[in-house]
Structure formats: C-alpha cells, structure tokens
Image (cartoon, helix red, strand yellow):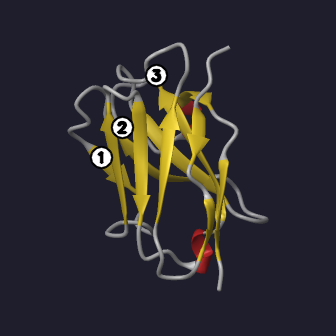
Amino acid sequence: QRQTVESGGGLVQPGGSLRLSCTAFGWSISPYPVGWFRQGPGKEREFVAAISSWNGGSALYDDSVKGRFTISRDNAKNTVDLQMNSLKPEDTAVYYCATSGVVQLTTIQGEYDYWGQGTQVTVSS
C-alpha cells in the first residue's frame, strides 16, 4: 500500500516559521501533483496548498495561507515541502500530504489517492 510520509512539525510561537516535508519510500511522487491538507482541533480536514507534477510550475493556495505559505518540490530528493511563515494560532493542526491522480490542481480531497499519517503543528506562546 503506497503512502506518503510527513515530517517537520512541532511547537512554534506565533509569528514563527516551520518547514514541513513530504516524501515517499519505494516509489516516486514526481509524476503526481501533491497537496497539503490540515485538520485543526474539532474541525474538518481542509485544503492548504497544492503543486503540479514534475517541475512544479503551478501552485494553488487556500486564501487563509496565501502570502504566508510556500509549496515547492525537489524531484531529486523525492520531496514536496511546505514553508510556513508568520504562523498564527489558527494554523494549529495536523498537516497531511497526499498525491493526486488528477493532472489539474485540485482542492478536492477525494481526488487525492495516497495519504500519510500527518505531522502535528502547534502555534502557541
């Protein structure tokens, strides 16, 4: 069963930064668009950002993170990173990455096939 693996979560103060990384073992995520999602306490899982396959020439962001978060990919390392700056308490959530089977970037969770277990991000003073 294919799955992705997230890392880089932790505790950070408001205004701080974290860099999350998504990878896979035994298979390449390069041919797939990759999305990041998050689920905050008592909330539904929601879309955060997505990047197109291969050269990652296109990206899509939720309005709540636009200008603060940046998604990027490194095919040589088989990773997709999410740089998170100017973090707010409302960014506290478990963050998941997943690969999409749809060529066009999408915010729809059902279009994503392979998911990881998530990494916890807590923004608190």
Residue at far right of view: 42
Marks 3,2: beta carbons within 8 A: no
Q: In terms of secondary structure, where does tag 3 sit?
A: loop
Instruction: Give residue 98's position: percent from left, percent from top.
Output: 54, 34
Of 62 and 91, the residue lying toward us:
91
- Residue beneath label 3, please? 101
Q: Amino acid at mark 1?
A: Ala
Query: Is the Cβ of the residue at disc 2 closer than 8 Å to that at disc 1?
Result: yes
Image x and y of residue 107, in percent: 47, 45
Q: Are marks 1 and 3 in contact (CB under 8 Å)?
A: no
Quarter occupied by residue 40: bottom right
What is the three-letter code of the residue carrying label 2? Leu
- Residue 56 visible in the displayed image: yes
Gap in angstroms between the C-alphas marked 2 and 1: 8 Å
| Residue 62 seen in the current view | no
Q: Secondary structure at mark 2?
A: loop
Q: Residues within 10 Å of mark 1 (few under 14, many from 20)?
A: some
In the image, is residue 70 above or below residue 4?
below
Height in image: 98 above or below 113?
below
Question: Looking at numbered disc 3 in the image, what kind of residue is underneath it?
Answer: Gly
* Residue at which label 1 appears: 59
User: Which circle's residue, 1 or 3, is located before the other in the chain?
Assistant: 1
43 left or right of 31? Answer: right
Look at the numbered disc 1 and give the secondary structure of its residue: strand
Q: Which residue is mark 2?
A: 105
Crowd rating for badge 3 (residues with CA inside 10 Å; few <14, some 14–19, many 20+):
some
Q: Is residue 59 left or right of residue 115?
A: left
